[in-house]
Every structure is written in C-alpha cells, then in structure tokens.
Image (cartoon, rainbow, N blue to C red):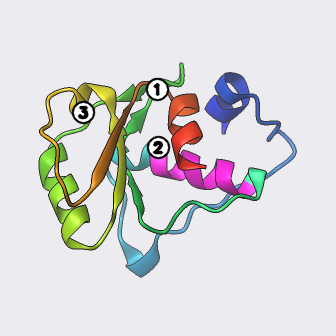
Amino acid sequence: MAVLEKRVGLQLQNYDSYVNVVGGIKLNEPSSDLGIIAAIASSYRDKEIDGGTVIIGEVGLAGEVRAVNFIEKRINEAAKLGFTKCVIPYNNYKNLKDDPKIKVYGVKSVEEALNIII
C-alpha cells in the first residue's frame, strides 16, 4: 500500500486492507506482489480487473516490477486455464516468444502495470 501511495498517488492512509487467498493456498514467494497491488488499486478505484487476466511479478519499494522464476511455465499454465491476458515483469518479457493463445504484456513499474490492468 505504501508503494501505491508513493509511486502511484493513491491516498490509502485511511484504509485497511486484508488479503485472502482462496482454497487455503499459502503465498510464500514474491511473484504475487503485483497481483495483490492490482487488487488493492482496483478496489480503491472501483474498477474491475478483467477476469481473463493473470498478473505475475515481484514489486520493489521504488515501484519497479522485478523478474520472477519459471515465467514460461507460469504463462503456459495460465493459457491452459483459459486466461487471455498476462501482465509480467519486462525483464522476463524481453526474452519470450509470442504465444497465440495469450497476450503477454511486459511492464517495468507498478504504474505501467495498472494502466494496462485497470
């Protein structure tokens, strides 16, 4: 939430946020950072995220979106599950080949990601 305030300009200081993951899945890696940030921004702006979008990326305190491991496997699984759009870190994106089943966007910052997502 601090990144959203400082880097995107959302005024969240008077709000609380609770993150719940369905099915009891435990999040033990930072690749879910960008998805959580997008969910908070979506709620604050009262704009839906398209249900066909998967969001992957670690977020640093400066608002940068950092690369994650196994990106090709993650994108392939998302496509198999029917997702049509995928937002990933630019450093992962620049080495990918196009996939006709899913449109992939590479982003460098949280602000850039939010412009695509919501």
Q: Tell me which label, 3 or 2, sits earlier in the chain.
A: 2
Q: Position of residue 77 (x, y in %)?
A: 18, 64
Mark 3 belongs to which amino acid?
Tyr
Say which residue label 1 marks: 60
Mark 2 or 1, closer to the camera: 2
Q: Is residue 54 above or below residue 87?
A: below
Mark 1 belongs to which amino acid?
Gly
Mark 2 belongs to which amino acid?
Leu
Find the residue positioned furthest to the front. 100
Q: Tell me which label, 1 or 3, sits earlier in the chain.
A: 1
Mark 3 or 2, closer to the camera: 3
Which quadrant holds the N terminus? top right
Q: Is residue 6 above or below residue 75?
A: above
Q: CA distance from mark 3 to mark 2?
A: 15 Å
Q: Helix, strand or loop at disc 3? A: helix
Q: Helix, strand or loop at disc 1? A: loop
Find the residue positioned furthest to the right. 14
Residue 24: tell me if it is visible: yes
Say which residue label 2 marks: 34
Residue 2 part of the magenta segment: no
Identify which residue is drawn at 21% across, 26% down: 94
Asked if the residues shown at circle 3 and circle 2 are in contact, with their CB atoms under 8 angstroms apart, the answer is: no
Nearest the eye: 66 or 89? 89
Query: Magenta segment range?
Result: 34-43
Nearest the eye: 13 or 56? 56
